[in-house]
Image (spheres, grey):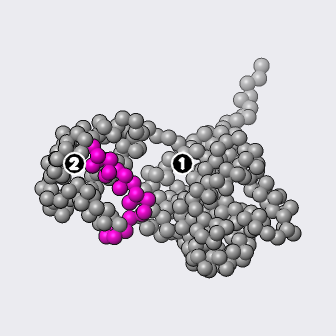
């Protein structure tokens, strides 16, 4: 009988090389399964994997429910369920213990945080004003500013995830066609049009300045060391310009994605197109933006409703 660590190693191998899952998913699986293994060693020492039953699972659910958010708990249990599914498929266990238990974890709905239009406009305005002041200056600071403008333009224009942006390869960006090819979650590929002269110009100017580094590294967005521009670097960069623009709220890269999706809905774009644009596998995920736009729609209807300003003709 294999040890728990050997079972985990085999499952990770299956996810990494047979299912070709995202490295971040693999990392989360490792963490979750290590936690489950530690739970078994502590509370059920010497227990074989084929002896894990619904009673042990219930203990574990109670264990991970302490101090974790519902979303985290659901992820940890999804990892464990996938692990036992694979063990059952390989005939390591006769029956997946998850078949004998019903789990419902209620996750509170939280609406996506967006950036007010005035703050987005102010951020871009301050960047372009700063660029105008440095157009006649050469050096690393100017190159960095050109890259940062290109990154922010793409985040907002294309609504991409920060990991998707940082993983862009040189041949994913087709400036002549005005589009970018994005490899999203689950290796789903989508083409996104670059709408507007500003984004095409920003990416073109950046590509011209960094052509040699891009050609050598293969990545489209490059850091000062000639390597891939990281997700954490994007977060720090945004934080720097938010402070410079004196925007009071904290802004994250993902908020640009939320903002463009919400504003597309407000402007009447069909939600099915927005689903494709964002790379959502399910329309349910996209529909959360409809809740964000409800207040906007209410104000718009009230302002334009034909009942407003009607003279009722109620004289003396």
Extent of the magenta region: 17-39
Nearer to the camera, 46 or 56: 46
Q: Does residue 142 belong to the magenta stretch?
A: no
In this rendering, position of residue 131 left or right of residue 51: right
Residue behind mark 1: 289
Q: Position of residue 303 (x, y in %)?
A: 70, 40
Q: Position of residue 45 (x, y in %)?
A: 19, 44
Q: Position of residue 119 (x, y in %)?
A: 72, 47
Instruction: State which quarter of the image contains the N terminus.
Output: bottom left
Q: Main secondary structure of the magenta part?
A: helix
**Picture layout, residue 224 above or below residue 239:** below
Residue 64, quarter of the rendered image = top left
Instruction: State which quarter of the image contains the C terminus.
Output: top right
Q: Residue at x 23, y 55 (%)?
A: 4
> In this rendering, does residue 65 appear at all?
yes
In this rendering, position of residue 33 left or right of residue 173: left
Q: Check residue 66 in the rendering and tell me which mark sits there, or answer none.
A: none
Residue behind mark 2: 98
């Amino acid at each position: 009988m294999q040890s728990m660590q050997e079972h985990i190693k085999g499952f990770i191998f299956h996810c990494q090389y047979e299912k070709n899952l995202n490295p971040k998913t693999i990392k989360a699986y490792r963490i979750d399964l290590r936690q489950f293994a530690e739970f078994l060693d502590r509370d059920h020492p010497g227990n074989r994997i084929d002896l894990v039953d619904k009673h042990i699972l219930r203990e574990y659910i109670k264990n991970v429910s302490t101090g974790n958010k519902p979303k985290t708990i659901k992820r940890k249990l999804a990892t464990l369920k996938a692990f036992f599914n694979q063990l059952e498929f390989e005939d390591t266990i006769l029956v997946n213990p998850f078949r004998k238990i019903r789990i419902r974890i209620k996750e509170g709905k939280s609406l996506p945080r967006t950036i007010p239009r005035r703050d987005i406009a102010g951020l871009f305005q301050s960047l372009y004003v700063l660029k105008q002041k440095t157009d006649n200056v050469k050096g690393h600071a100017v190159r960095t500013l050109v890259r940062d403008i290109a990154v922010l333009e793409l985040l907002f224009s294309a609504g991409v995830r920060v990991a998707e942006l940082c993983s862009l390869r040189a041949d994913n960006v087709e400036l002549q066609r005005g589009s970018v090819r994005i490899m999203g979650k689950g290796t789903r590929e989508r083409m996104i049009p670059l709408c507007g002269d500003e984004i095409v110009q920003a990416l073109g100017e950046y590509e011209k300045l960094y052509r040699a580094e891009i050609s050598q590294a293969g990545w489209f967005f490059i850091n000062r060391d000639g390597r891939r521009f990281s997700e954490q670097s994007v977060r720090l960069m945004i934080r720097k310009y938010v402070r410079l623009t004196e925007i009071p709220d904290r802004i994250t890269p993902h908020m640009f994605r939320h903002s463009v999706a919400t504003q597309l809905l407000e402007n009447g774009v069909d939600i099915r197109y927005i689903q494709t644009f964002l790379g959502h596998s399910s329309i349910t995920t996209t529909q959360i933006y409809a809740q964000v736009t409800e207040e906007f729609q209410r104000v718009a209807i009230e302002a334009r409703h034909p009942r407003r300003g009607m003279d009722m003709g109620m004289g003396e």
